[in-house]
Image (cartoon, rainbow, N blue to C red):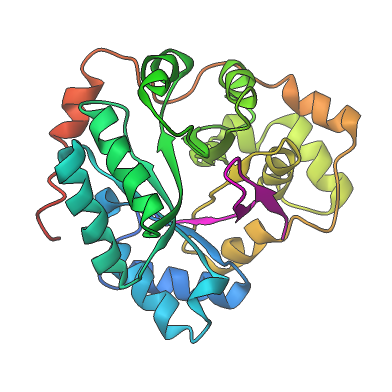
Amino acid sequence: MINIKLNDGNEIPAVGFGVFMIEPNGPTYDAVKEAIKTGYRHFDSAAAYFNEADLGRAVKDSGIPREEFFITSKLWLQDYGYEAAKKGIETSLAKLKMDYMDLYLLHQPYGDVAGAWKALEDAKKEGKIRSIGVSNMTPKIWNKWIPEFETIPAVNQVECNPLFQQKELRKLLDEKDVKIEAWYPLGHGSRELIENPVILKLAEKYGKNSGQIILRFEVQEGIIVLPKSTNPERIAGNLDIFDFELTEREMEEIRQMDTGKGSHNPEADGVAEMLLGAFDVHQER
């Protein structure tokens, strides 16, 4: 495993295990347990995934010391604003049954972002969170909010893969040494990506599958990746990317695949309202 140093001095494993869209009350627990057995120590959850408790239970039941894990969760929109965010942080810690989180993110960039961020900053000072970051911030949204922050985020978790490489955003974040974490690092299984001739050619050359080539490209670009699977073979395969290295020419071939377009536009009209009404994190599932 490669660790990436964040702008606050903390280190994060380059490959994490995402639990987005894995059902709570069993399936998440089983998937995390399998991932831990495979060798994962970096796990990414969120209040809005409703499976923080499963993640925490799997980590505890592993018997491996807490400090060997890197645990991320995220604050949902209903808990934005300073006081609400403080309660949201405590709720995540309680569900995880942990004294601290390694990384905590603002899940969406809408509403009282500044108030919520101040709560994250204070929780970091109190030792409840080691690193703090944001999610789904485009360059425009980044430039709107960051001037109001006392602390520069350590990461910005956004959609990122070879078809949507976030080149403009990465250039902006590089100025403050902010790392990108990629959700949908495999393009949500897009055939356009997985079956791209460039990817297939490299997979044959290195004796890897398409997903492993894609993840290797992203890690070599300095991107933190969060692949998700409940299939034991794929869980293991997504971590098995450190025994080969793409050449600079091969990296450039994949860079040329960028379309500049993703599946989600955080700036689109009505997105904030749609997300706020999508579900209630205060209701147990």
Residue 87 image position (x, y, % from top left):
17, 53
Residue 32 image position (x, y, % from top left):
45, 69
- Could you tell me how many numbered marks the image carries? 0
39 left or right of 30? right
Asked if residue 130 can be seen in this view, the reply is yes
- Say which of 253 and 117 sits in front: 117
113 left or right of 263? left
Residue sitting at 60 percent across and 27 percent down?
A: 176
Q: Is 5 covered by the magenta stretch?
A: yes
Residue sitting at 66 percent across and 36 percent down?
A: 195
Q: Residue furthest left?
A: 283
* 223 relative to 172, above or below: below
Q: Which residues are magenta?
A: 1-18
Q: Is 176 covered by the magenta stretch?
A: no
Q: Quadrant of the N terminus?
A: bottom right
Residue sitting at 48 percent across and 23 percent down?
A: 262
* 87 relative to 28, above or below: above
9 left or right of 77? right
Residue 41 image position (x, y, % from top left):
56, 67
Quarter of the rendering containing residue 252? top right
Quarter of the rendering containing residue 210? top right
* 173 relative to 132, above or below: above
Residue 52 image position (x, y, % from top left):
31, 63
Residue sitting at 37 percent across and 68 percent down?
A: 55
Q: Quadrant of the C terminus?
A: bottom left
Asked if residue 163 can be seen in this view, the reply is no
